[in-house]
Image (cartoon, rainbow, N blue to C red):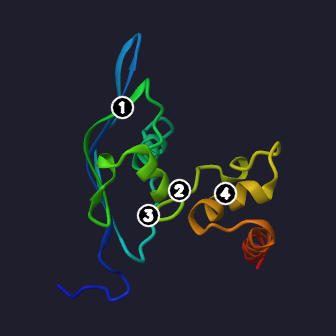
Amino acid sequence: MASDSRIGDVVLEVKDLQTYFVTRWGVTKAVDGVSFNLRKGETLGIVGESGSGKSVTVSSVMRLIPSPPGHIVGGEILLEGENLLDLDESEMNKVRGDKIAMVLQDPMTALNPVFDIEDQVGEALKIHEGLKGPGLKETVIDMLSKGLD
């Protein structure tokens, strides 16, 4: 079978992901056995009914499940061959926004009007690129301007 030259190697591999929530009513298996691959150059959309586990799946991949009550109880999340479940929180903070990010279901509600847009959009640039001051502001303005094209 010929391979598509536009699509590269697997960069994200999720294997048998299981994320459960423990409540006073029992255990809810929000994600139970999800697997998928994402290759370089691909775009992945996760669709499903409300309550089907889309947001919990992506939050699990990003390691943003609130614990308690949520726990990733099984599976692997391999980003460029490294299992994100093996990373401590400080290591994971270096990965988020640099090597992996997510677009929320409703990106219009992702910005908080209480906080300056420069701070919200520029947060990842500060953390991962070390930008600050006029250079940060210039980069944020440039990024936002590109969205208007």
Amino acid type, label 2: Met
Residue 17 or residue 71, whichever sits in front:
71
Rendered residue at 35%/81% (across/down): 7
**Mark earlier in primary sequence (1, 2):** 1
* Spot occupied by residue 31 in the image (x, y as percentages of width and height): 35, 38
Amino acid type, label 3: Leu
The local secondary structure at tag 4 comes to: helix
Q: In this view, does 61 lie above or below 149?
A: above
Q: Could you tell me how far apart the alpha carbons at marks 1 and 3 are, in whole angstroms? A: 24 Å
Which quadrant of the view contains residue 125? bottom right
**Mark earlier in primary sequence (3, 2):** 3
**Mark earlier in primary sequence (4, 3):** 3
Residues at circles 2 and 4 in contact by the CB criterion of under 8 Å: no
**Mark earlier in primary sequence (1, 3):** 3
The residue that label 4 is drawn on is 123
Crowd around label 4: few <14 · some 14–19 · many ≥20 (10 Å): some
Rendered residue at 48%/42% (across/down): 64
Residue 61 or residue 31, whichever sits in front:
61
Quadrant for the N terminus, please: bottom left
Amino acid type, label 1: His
The local secondary structure at tag 2 comes to: loop
